[in-house]
Amino acid sequence: MININEVIETNRMIEKENLDVRTITMGISLLDCASDDVDRLCARIREKILRKAGNLAKTADDISMEYGIPIVNKRISVTPVSIVGASACKSPDDYVRIAMTLDEAAAETGVNFLGGYSAVVSKGMTESDRLLIESIPEALAKTGRICSSVNVGSTKTGINMDAVRLMGEIIRKTAEATRESDSGGCAKLVVLCNAPDDNPFMAGAFHGVTETDAVINVGVSGPGVVKSALENVRGASFEVLCETIKKTAFKITRVGQLVAQEASHRLGIPFGIIDLSLAPTPAIGDSVADILHEIGVEKAGAPGTTAALALLNDQVKKGGVMASSYVGGLSGAFIPVSEDQGMIDAAECGALTIEKLEAMTCVCSVGLDMIAIPGNTPAATISGIIADEAAIGMVNQKTTAVRIIPVIGKDVGDRVEFGGLLGYAPVMPVSRFGCEDFIRREGRIPAPIHSFKN
């Protein structure tokens, strides 16, 4: 039972501490849309998305109005399109047609983003996978709501270095194709290792083949709420610090659970998971970096940052799992640069570097996220960054990702504006030393020894 004190406390968190439900994401299987004809496939995809998600945005708005809980984004994720289009698509242009169909369907349903323009190639690429990947730059240049992801590795299979090499080139081409928007297409493209099937957050969301026909996944967020709670225990012991974060995460997750169950009931779609990630925004006071400062580091990137982030991530998960039996997705703390004002400030003053961010990804939810780099960065260097991050995920049995933006025409010291939740970012330096000989090798890095558990 939720008592009156919890109601009052939740209202305060919403009004003053930026508590929100970051997204309701409906996952939709497109496997039954498969056809050997592109026109028929596109028609089936459009019909199913409109049939399943036609009321998603309105239902979310109704719940938000009735309960007074902000629901920031309404999103759709679909089966990885490289699987759905395998029979029909014979060229990258065929896949671009599917992307435009998805974009039109997303606009008709009123959702903010649609994820799943994706390929899962952790052990090898089919011809269909390769065609979709090659279509990504044009697809993201011609659409406004489509998000793309490619999973290049896993703990069980190792890292597909052929795919890593290709993705470095694809990110460069996407940056060129969208240079008029400061290479903004790359903000909707992420490369993952150990991608989960049920992630509601973009750009990495897709509806995995292990999922049911349609499902409701909810992502909650509340960095401002955690920061506010920690302000009340300044100087306290680690035990008090951890208990405070756990209790706060529990309360945040309860709000998400309420919204998820209500949306599931009204839409007649099964409830899947709650992703209890702390996802920041550019709003003042809604920052993971500010939480790290409250824990005791002067700036994100200072000595102690990785330990503080590890503590935060673990306690968020411990508190959240007590509030919901179905916690999934990524869950923990996100550390995007452009979407977190504290991270932006730390990067601009030199406290935070890409190398330190990479170290932090060993203990947080995802990886190198929304980082602007010089537009002349070689494709091989981008591939090397992807390989490093995938190795962290593979060896540590966790999800890692790279969403990096080589901004054409910009260099270190420049600032890039993405707008909205994507915020803005300083262009950060990357190593001037190359890795071309490493990236040029063919094949895959084998799975680590501890992956063999059968």
Image: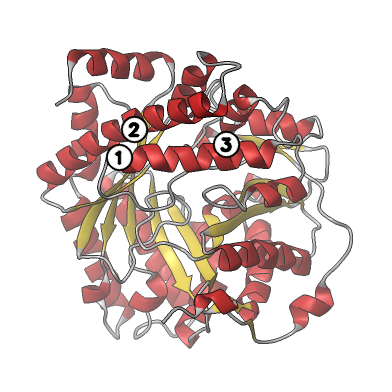
Viewer-proximal residue among 120 and 425: 120
Q: Does residue 23 appear anywhere in the picture?
A: no
Viewer-proximal residue among 55 and 292: 292
Q: Which residue is depicted at the point 44% across and 51% down?
A: 330
Q: Amino acid at mark 1?
A: Met
Q: Amino acid at mark 3?
A: Glu
Mark 2 crowdedness (10 Å alpha carbons): few <14, some 14-19, many ≥20: many
Q: Position of residue 417 (x, y in %)?
A: 65, 36
For residue 263, what is the image quadrant? top left
Disc 1: which residue: 322
Q: Amino acid at mark 2?
A: Phe
Mark 3 crowdedness (10 Å alpha carbons): few <14, some 14-19, many ≥20: many
Mark 1 crowdedness (10 Å alpha carbons): few <14, some 14-19, many ≥20: some
Q: Earlier in the sequence, mark 3 or mark 2?
A: 2
Q: Which image quarter is the N terminus in?
A: top left
Disc 2: which residue: 250
When the figure is inspected, residue 190 is found, relative to residue 353, above or below; the finding is below
Q: Position of residue 93 (x, y in %)?
A: 48, 75
Question: What distance separates the C-alpha of mark 1 from that of mark 2?
Answer: 7 Å
The reply to whether callout 1 and callout 2 are in contact (CB within 8 Å) is yes
Viewer-proximal residue among 366 and 377: 366
Q: How is the image coloured?
A: secondary structure
The reply to whether callout 1 and callout 3 are in contact (CB within 8 Å) is no
Q: Which residue is depicted at the point 35% across and 30% down?
A: 252
Residue sticking out furthest to the right? 433
Q: Position of residue 146 (x, y in %)?
A: 44, 55
Disc 3: which residue: 339
Question: What distance separates the C-alpha of mark 3 from that of mark 2?
Answer: 24 Å
